[in-house]
Image (cartoon, rainbow, N blue to C red):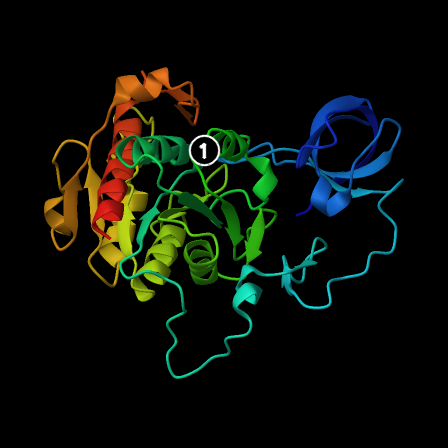
């Protein structure tokens, strides 16, 4: 159930950030909250706000944070919706219209050839399972393919707001990402797309990406069940990319120190995704290992320079574990970036 509380802003952070940091008095409590400025506007000290309270029993890795639902002081104003657009978060109290990336190719109407124009043959697309994989994938990709343009398609499976990630602006600033498109239910990137397929087509055709990586925002969908997890979102991304003729490189989720047995070794999220995939995929490996039960996929060994990544200064934590505590997680992601770069050179 949605938990809403009324409060007053006691301190307001940088208003130019996509997610403005606030201190809010809620009854007798002082809590940290975030305001998605693209949705609810900029907050100021003294503003009266309604805050959505994060669940206290959120699963490990979930992006649980208090969020401003509406600014009662400034948010009740008339806004003219775009003349053409699609609705994100439709049917919820946060529904809003966006101009979809697909509209840039609106002049091309559906025809006998469903394949969109401008998409290179065998365009390389990596599919990842956690937002924490994004930095090592992007870093390793650029080590092996300097100057190539790597785009990020943010999917469901984690946090939906595009501005919630502090990692994406850092990677953009360092030239490791060439764009950020939010697809499907995700919203608030540099460009919004109605679908993952539309996001990929826009990235390659309009933004001239050489490769792309599909991954969720911060946090992860998980329920300790066979099918209720982000691996199924990754499966959807892989199928969308494969249907467009892209070469799909899976960035496997691996760990030697995750406290949950189902995520040690090859995570059950990755194993399930590969078992259910309708087509063979390329799977990156850092040590040459493959899973005998998943031999129909093409396992490719990539470089995993852990020392180089550690020296890069990029964030190297996953669900509270550092690179030193879980090197296998980062080695698998680095290998995926290396394999993606090789696929880019071959394309």
User: Which residue does the image show at 88% across and 51% down from the upper left?
Assistant: 77
Is residue 67 visible in the rendered structure shown here?
yes
Disc 1 packing (10 Å; few <14; some 14–19; many ≥20):
some
Is residue 261 visible in the rendered structure shown here?
no
In the rendered image, residue 235, in percent from the top left (x then y), is placed at 34, 55
In the rendered image, residue 273, in percent from the top left (x then y), is placed at 29, 52
User: Which residue does the image show at 27% across and 43% down from the upper left?
Assistant: 340
Q: Residue furthest front?
A: 147
Question: In the rendered image of this protein, does residue 271 appear above or below residue 12?
Answer: below
Question: In the rendered view, does 113 fall on the left or right side of 206?
Answer: left
Question: In the rendered image of this protein, does residue 270 appear above or below residue 23?
Answer: below
Q: Residue furthest bottom?
A: 112
In the rendered image, residue 11, in percent from the top left (x then y), is placed at 79, 22
User: Which residue does the image show at 31% across and 28% down from the upper left?
Assistant: 330
The residue indicated by pointer 1 is: 175
Question: In the rendered view, does 324 fall on the left or right side of 20?
Answer: left
In the rendered image, residue 208, in percent from the top left (x then y), is placed at 42, 52
Nearer to the camera, 79 or 173: 173
Write down the quadrant of residue 53 in the picture: top right
Determine the secondary structure under disc 1. Answer: loop
Nearer to the camera, 186 or 338: 338
Question: In the rendered view, does 118 fall on the left or right side of 59?
Answer: left
Write down the quadrant of residue 281 in the picture: bottom left
Question: In the rendered image of this protein, does residue 16 appear above or below residue 226?
Answer: above
């Amino acid at each position: 159930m949605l938990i809403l509380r009324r409060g007053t802003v006691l301190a307001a952070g940088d208003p130019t950030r996509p997610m403005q940091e606030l201190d809010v008095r809620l009854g007798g409590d002082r809590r940290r909250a975030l305001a998605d400025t693209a949705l609810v506007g900029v907050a100021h000290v003294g503003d009266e706000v309604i805050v959505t309270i994060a669940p206290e029993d959120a699963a490990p890795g979930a992006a649980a944070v208090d969020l401003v639902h509406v600014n009662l002081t400034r948010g009740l104003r008339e806004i003219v919706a775009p003349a053409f657009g699609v609705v994100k978060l439709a049917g919820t109290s946060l529904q809003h219209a966006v101009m979809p990336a697909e509209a840039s190719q609106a002049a091309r109407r559906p025809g006998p050839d469903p394949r969109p124009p401008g998409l290179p043959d065998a365009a390389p697309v990596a599919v990842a399972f956690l937002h924490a994989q994004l930095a090592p994938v992007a870093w390793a990709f650029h080590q092996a393919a300097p100057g190539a343009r790597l785009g990020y398609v943010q999917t469901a499976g984690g946090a939906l707001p595009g501005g919630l990630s502090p990692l994406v602006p850092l990677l953009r600033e360092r030239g490791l990402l060439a764009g950020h498109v939010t697809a499907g239910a995700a919203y608030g990137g540099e460009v919004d797309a109605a679908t993952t397929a539309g996001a990929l087509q826009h990235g390659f055709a309009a933004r001239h990406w050489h490769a792309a990586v599909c991954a969720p925002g911060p946090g992860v969908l998980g329920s300790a069940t066979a099918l209720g997890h982000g691996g199924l979102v990754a499966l959807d991304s892989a199928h969308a990319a494969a249907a467009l003729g892209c070469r799909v490189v899976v960035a496997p989720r691996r760990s030697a120190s995750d406290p949950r047995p189902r995520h040690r070794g090859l995570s059950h999220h990755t194993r399930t995704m590969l078992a259910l995939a309708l087509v063979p995929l390329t799977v990156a490996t850092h040590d040459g290992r493959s899973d005998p039960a998943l031999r129909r996929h093409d396992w490719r060994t990539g470089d995993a320079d852990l020392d180089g990544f550690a020296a890069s200064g990029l964030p190297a934590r996953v669900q509270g574990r550092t690179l030193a505590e879980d090197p296998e997680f980062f080695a698998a992601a680095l290998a995926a970036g290396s394999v993606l770069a090789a696929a880019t050179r071959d394309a």
